[in-house]
Image: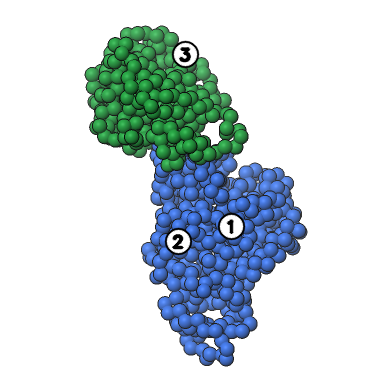
Amino acid sequence: MASLKHLLGIEGLNPASVTNLLDLAESYALLNRSGKTQRDSLRGRTLINLFFEDSTRTRTSFELAGRRLGADVVNMSVATSSVTKGETLLDTAATLNAMNCDLLVVRHKSSGAPALLAQKVGASVINAGDGTHEHPTQALLDALTIRRNKGRLSGLTVAICGDVLNSRVARSDILLLTMMGNFVRLVGPPTLVPGAIGVNGVEIFHDMEEGLKGADIVMMLRLQKERMTSGLIPSAREYFTFYGLDRKKLAYAKPDAMVMHPGPMNRGVEIDSEVADDAARSLIREQVEMGVAVRMAVLDTCARSNS
Amino acid sequence: MSILFRKIKYLDQSAQALHEGELLVQDGKIADFGASLGVPEGAEIIEAEGAVLCPGLVDMRAAIGEPGYEYRETIASAAAAAAAGGITSLAVLPETNPVIDDPALVQFLRARGEETGSLTLLPYAAATRGLEGKELAEYGLLKAAGAVAFTDGSKAIASSRTMRLALFYASGFGARIVQHPEDVDLARGAAATAGARATWMGLPYVYAAAEAICVARDIRLAELTGGALHFAHVTTGEALDLIRRAKEKGLKITCDTAPPYFDLNETAIGDYRTYAKLSPPLRSEADRQAVVAALKDGTIDAIASDHHPCDPDDKRQPFAEAAPGGAGLATLLGVTLVRVQEGDLTLPQALALLTAKPAAWLGIEAGVLAKGRPADLCLFHPEKSWQVQAGKLPGKAQNTPFDGRALEGVVLGTWKAGRRVFGA
C-alpha cells in the first residue's frame, strides 16, 4: 500500500491509491458486519478529533473507527471556546504537537485550514471537511457504497444535485468520480452551481429531468438554510418543486438508479421522505455504515506511513 | 561636499534615453551631467561600470502602519525598505489609526517624513471622514496642509452619490480623487478571483468584472462632474479598456498598477499561499497580459508598489481569514525591470513609470534629472541578480508575494538630497 502521510483531499490521490483504500475499507466493512469489530492495529496511538465546526455524525464516525482499531480517541471541540479567546489555529497546532498525537482529524470552516495545520504538526492530518474545499472521506465512502451496489466504479453516470457551489462533498466527489472514469452531472439552479469547473467529464444542467436522464446514481446535497436568507434561492417551497427529489423526478433516472445523500437530510426541501426511506432505492443508511469502514482504512493507512 | 558619478548610464531629463557619462552632485543638488566632467577638488568619486543612475523612485501608493499599526510597519522601517528599493518619495494612504482626515495629521506625516532624512512622505488624505464613505473630508484645508490627493485607500467609495459629490467638490480645488476600483457589493468577503481555481480551492470569490463595473460608473461620474479621477492598482483588461476609451475622450482619468498584477497571476495562490492574497486579488493570465499591454501602450500612467505591510500573525491564517496585502517597496524596481528583460518596455519607459510620470502626477519636483534639482538618486545594476526572500527583506514587513523569486536589478545606492541613505 502506497504511503499516505496526510489525507487533505482527493486531489493528490491517484486511481491506484483510491482502489487500495476502498479494498481495505471493504475488508473492514465485512469484519464490522460479522461482529468482529475490535482490532488492535492502532493500539497505543492517539487520535484527536479536532472539530472547529459542529458535526456529530462525522465526529462519531471517526471516533468509532479509531476505537475499533484500538486507538486512544480524544474529542476536542473548539467551535467557540478557543477561537473567541483569540487563540490562532497555529497556537492550537503547537498545543497538539506538545501532546504528541499521532492522528489529527480536522474539521474547519475555512478552506485550506487542514493543509495549514499539516505544515505545522507532526501528526498525520486527516481532513474531515474544510470550508467549501474538500471532504475526502465522504467521497471515499460514497465511492465504496457505489462500488458495492453497482459492482464497479467506472463508466457510471452520477448526477450530483443541489447546492454544488457551497459543497465540499461535491468537490471531493467530482474529483474522485471523474478520476475513476465516471461521468458527472451537476444539477441545480444557476445560483447554486459554479460556472467555472474546468474538469473533463463534468456537465452542468439546470433542469432535473434533463440532468437525471440515464443516471445510475442520484446524489442529493444538503441545502443550508443560509442559502435562502442570502438570496441564492427564493424559498424552500420553490426549491423543492423544481429541485427536490421525489418519486416523479427519480423516474427520469435509470430504472435501477440509486439515491444517495451525505446527510443530514432536510426532508421536504432537497429530498422527499418517500424516496429517502425507500430501502429498494436509497443507499443513505449504507453510506453511514461505509463511513466507519472507510475511516478505519484511512486511519490505518495514515498511521502506518507515520510510524 | 560634492559627488561625481563616473562610468554610469543616466536617464536624461526627457526620460527618453540613456546616456553614458558622468553626473555631478554639489551641495545636495544636481550640478551637472555630461559625457565627461572635470573632478572638483575633494569630490567623492563613485565609479560604477555598467550601472544606471536614475532619479530616486517616486512610489505613488503605499500603506504604512504608522500611526496606529506600528507592529506592521513604522515610518522608520518603511523608510529603510524604501531606501533599499531606491525610493526617495512615497505617497502614503490615509488608512491609519487615526485616519488621515485632519489637516494636523497631514502636517504630522510630512514632518515625520522629513525626520527620516531619506524619504519624502506625501500623504493622501481621506476622501470621506473616517473612510466611512459618507461625509466628505475637508479637501480645501487638507490640500493646503499638503495632502496630495483624496482617497479612501483600500476601501472603494461605494455610494454613487458620495462619489459624485467627491469628484464635483474636489474639482473646485483642482484636487484628485483616487478610487480603489471594486464593486463593494460583489466583492464582499472575497479572497480570490472567480474562476476554476477559486472554485476548486473552495475560496469566496469576486468576479473580475466587479472592477470594470466600478470603473464604468466612476468614469461616467467624472464626465458628469468634470472631476479628476485616478484608479489605483488596476488589474483587469476590461477596466483598462474603459480607461483607455475615457482617456481618448479627453476625460481627466488616470490610473496605476502594481508589480504583482503584471508579474503574477492567480496560480500564485496555489497551496493557500497567504502572502499572495492581495486586494484586489491576483487575476487570470489573460488579465495579467492585458495589464502588460496597457503598460506598453501608455494607458497606465505609473507603477506603484502598492506596499501593504502585514504581520506574520495577519498572514498565518486559513486563506479566507488572512489579511490581504503584499510588501512591495524593496521589489518595486526589480519586478518592473522584468518587463524590460522580457522586451515589453524599454528601460527608459520602465523608469519613467517609476519616476517622471508619478512625480508629474503628484506635482512634485522630483523624478527627473535636472540641473539645480535636489539630488534624489538611485544607482542600480540592471544585470546583477538577487533572490527575494521573505524574512530577509529590508524593513519590518516581510509579506512579499514574490518570495523565492530571482530578480535582475540590484540597487547599489540611494541618495536623498545628495546624502547617501542606502548602500555602502
Considering the numbered disc 1 on the image, is that residue within a helix, a strand or a loop? strand
The answer to whether residue B191 shows anywhere in this view is no
Same chain? Circles 1 and 2: yes
Identity of the residue furthest to the front in this view:
A44
Does A289 sit left or right of B124 as displayed?
left
Does A125 sit left or right of A156 as displayed?
right
Chain the render paints green = A
Q: Amino acid at mark 2?
A: Val
Q: Amino acid at mark 3?
A: Arg
Marks 1 & 3, CB-CB < 8 Å contact: no
**Disc number for residue A267:** 3
Return the chain for callout 3.
A
Chain B is shown in which shade? blue
Asked if residue A290 is positioned above or below residue A299 in the image, the reply reads above
Q: Amino acid at mark 1?
A: Ala
Q: Residue at x 36, y 16 (%)?
A: A289
Q: Position of residue B162 (x, y in %)?
A: 68, 46
Which quadrant would residue A302 be assigned to in this image?
A: top left
